[in-house]
Image (tube, rainbow, N blue to C red):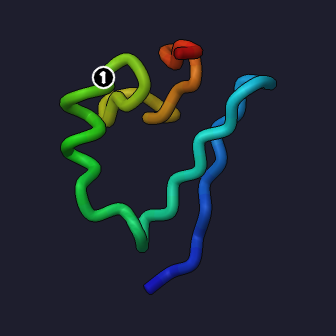
Amino acid sequence: MSDKKYRYNNGELTIVWQPSLCSHSGKCVKTLPQVYNPDAKPWITTGGCNNR
């Protein structure tokens, strides 16, 4: 499998996506649609992340 890593950063938060480790991406899309949108480019956006 590929060791590729994709980083999405908004200056405060970085989301790292590793396709070789991601086996349940559908769960992310369903539970966090403001972050994960497979129809958009880029499909991961940090704009929808809230500090909790």
Within 10 Å of disc 1 (Cα), the crowding (few <14, some 14-19, many 20+) is some
**Quadrant where the N terminus is found in the figure:** bottom left
Q: Where residue 44 sits in the image (x, y, percent)?
A: 48, 34
Q: Is residue 48 above or below residue 2?
A: above
Residue at the far front: name it.
52
Q: Is residue 28 above or below residue 2?
A: above
Left or right? Give the position of 45 relative to 37: right
Specify the quadrant of the image occupied by residue 13.
top right
Q: Where residue 46 sits in the image (x, y, percent)?
A: 57, 24
Specify the quadrant of the image occupied by residue 51.
top right
Quick one: SS at disc 1? loop
Residue depicted at x 76% and y 24%: 12
Residue at the far right: name it.
11
Residue at the far bottom: name it.
1
Residue depicted at x 51% and y 34%: 42
Left or right? Give the position of 18 relative to 24: right
- All told, the count of numbered labels is 1
Left or right? Give the position of 13 relative to 50: right
Residue depicted at x 65% and y 47%: 7
The three-letter amino acid code for the residue at tag 1 is: Pro
Residue depicted at x 52% and y 53%: 17
* Residue behind mark 1: 33
Q: Where residue 16 sits in the image (x, y, percent)?
A: 59, 50
